[in-house]
Image (cartoon, rainbow, N blue to C red):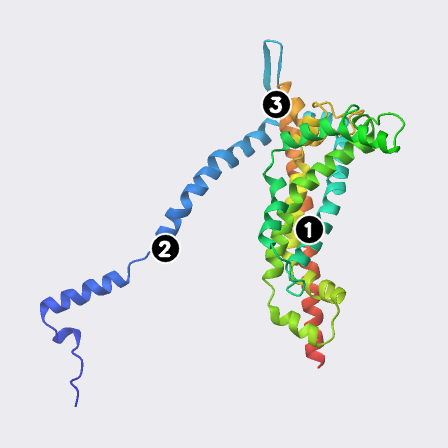
């Protein structure tokens, strides 16, 4: 018969001390290390994001600008900056920003979805996928300033695009792309499309590759064709990544600055139809009108928050509705 284990009282003194030390070690709480590791992020966020955000909101209620060598303010004026802001061409600049974002985002998401579906389809047996991924992503690495200068040279009145079109007989005289509303907005949208569709494609490819192959095999056995497979299986399952792409693209579209700024020299030509909200903000900062710049920054923050919340709510509502329908079907059966 095996000996029964000794109770703590029956153990020798030295053994009892060792057991108590071991029990103490087991009770050590290591959760503090999690807080220590995330502390640098919150410290940086507090110093470089939260404090400037609160300061920007505060300045939006003050008259604070520089005229010549004289600095006026800060003098508290309430909501006068917001009243003056909405009395300006704010609506026009908001519309410019949205229309150029939409023109660039719609082909971006469509082409990214098509490419992602092609490259992740095992039945197509595409060779050199790694090479094509690199080529697709390369425009994202090119600086916006370089892209803008390239397009400015290509589409100028004496540029190669006009010369080629005239030689082919499409144009009788050089077309002024940057002097027309459609031409200038289209150039901005095309540049944004070229710079970001590769990043969107890579994200969507990762989302599709995360879907279990068993689902596609089961759909194929059930006689599902390519169109049904894409719209009934792929799209619903990558909806979270689509929502993420839409939200990040929307925020990036509201912050559109470098491409139209360089392409039009900061003037938003023709007739300020390519003037974006951030370009308008930059004008106030250059004029050192910090009160109006703060009010415009708060406006951008609120608009971004509302639009992102709407997109997030729409995506969640659709998924919740699908879950409720499936639950009801299960209860009936």
Whether residue 11 is visible here, answered yes or no, is yes
Res 211 → quadrant: bottom right
Instruction: Please indicate whether residue 165 sits to the left or right of residue 197 in the image.
Output: right
The residue drawn where x is 64% and y is 37% is 301
- Label 3's element? helix
Looking at the rendered structure, which numbered label has been put on residue 31?
2
Mark 1 touching mark 2, by CB under 8 A? Answer: no
Q: According to the image, label 3 marks what residue?
A: 290
Q: How far apart are marks 1 and 2 (CA)?
A: 42 Å
Closer mark to the observer between disc 1 and disc 2: 1
Quadrant holding the N terminus: bottom left
The residue drawn where x is 66% and y is 55% is 116
Q: According to the image, label 1 marks what residue?
A: 112
Q: Distance between the residues labelled 3 and 1?
A: 40 Å
Instruction: Please indicate whether residue 14 sits to the left or right of residue 207 in the image.
Output: left
In the rendered image, residue 235, in percent from the top left (x then y), is placed at 69, 60
In the rendered image, residue 182, in percent from the top left (x then y), is placed at 82, 33
């Amino acid at each position: 018969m095996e000996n029964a284990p000794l109770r703590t009282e029956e153990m020798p003194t030295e053994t009892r001390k060792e057991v108590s030390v071991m029990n103490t070690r087991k009770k050590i709480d290591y959760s503090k290390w999690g807080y220590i590791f995330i502390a640098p992020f919150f410290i940086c966020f507090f110093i470089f994001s939260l404090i400037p955000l609160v300061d920007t909101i505060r300045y939006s209620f003050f008259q604070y600008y520089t005229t010549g060598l004289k600095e006026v303010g800060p003098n508290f004026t309430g909501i006068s900056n917001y009243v003056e802001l909405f009395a300006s061409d704010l609506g026009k600049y908001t519309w410019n920003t949205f229309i150029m974002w939409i023109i660039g985002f719609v082909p971006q998401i469509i082409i990214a979805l098509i490419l992602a579906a092609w490259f992740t389809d095992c039945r197509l047996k595409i060779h050199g996928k790694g090479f094509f991924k690199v080529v697709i992503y390369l425009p994202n690495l090119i600086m916006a300033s370089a892209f803008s200068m390239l397009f400015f040279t290509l589409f100028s009145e004496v540029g190669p695009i006009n010369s080629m079109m005239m030689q082919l007989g499409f144009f009788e005289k050089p077309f002024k792309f940057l002097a027309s509303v459609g031409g200038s907005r289209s150039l901005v949208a095309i540049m944004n499309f070229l710079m970001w569709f590769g990043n969107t494609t890579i994200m969507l490819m990762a989302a599709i590759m995360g879907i279990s192959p068993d689902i596609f095999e089961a759909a194929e056995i059930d006689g599902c064709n390519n169109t049904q497979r894409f719209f009934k299986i792929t799209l619903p399952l990558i909806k979270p990544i689509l929502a993420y792409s839409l939200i990040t693209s929307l925020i990036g579209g509201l912050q559109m600055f470098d491409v139209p700024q360089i392409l039009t020299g900061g003037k938003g030509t023709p007739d300020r139809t390519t003037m974006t909200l951030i370009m308008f903000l930059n004008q106030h900062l250059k004029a050192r009108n910090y009160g109006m710049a703060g009010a415009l920054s708060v406006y951008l923050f609120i608009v971004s928050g509302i639009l992102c919340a709407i997109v997030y709510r729409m995506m969640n509502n659709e998924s919740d509705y699908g879950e409720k329908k499936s639950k009801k079907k299960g209860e009936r059966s």
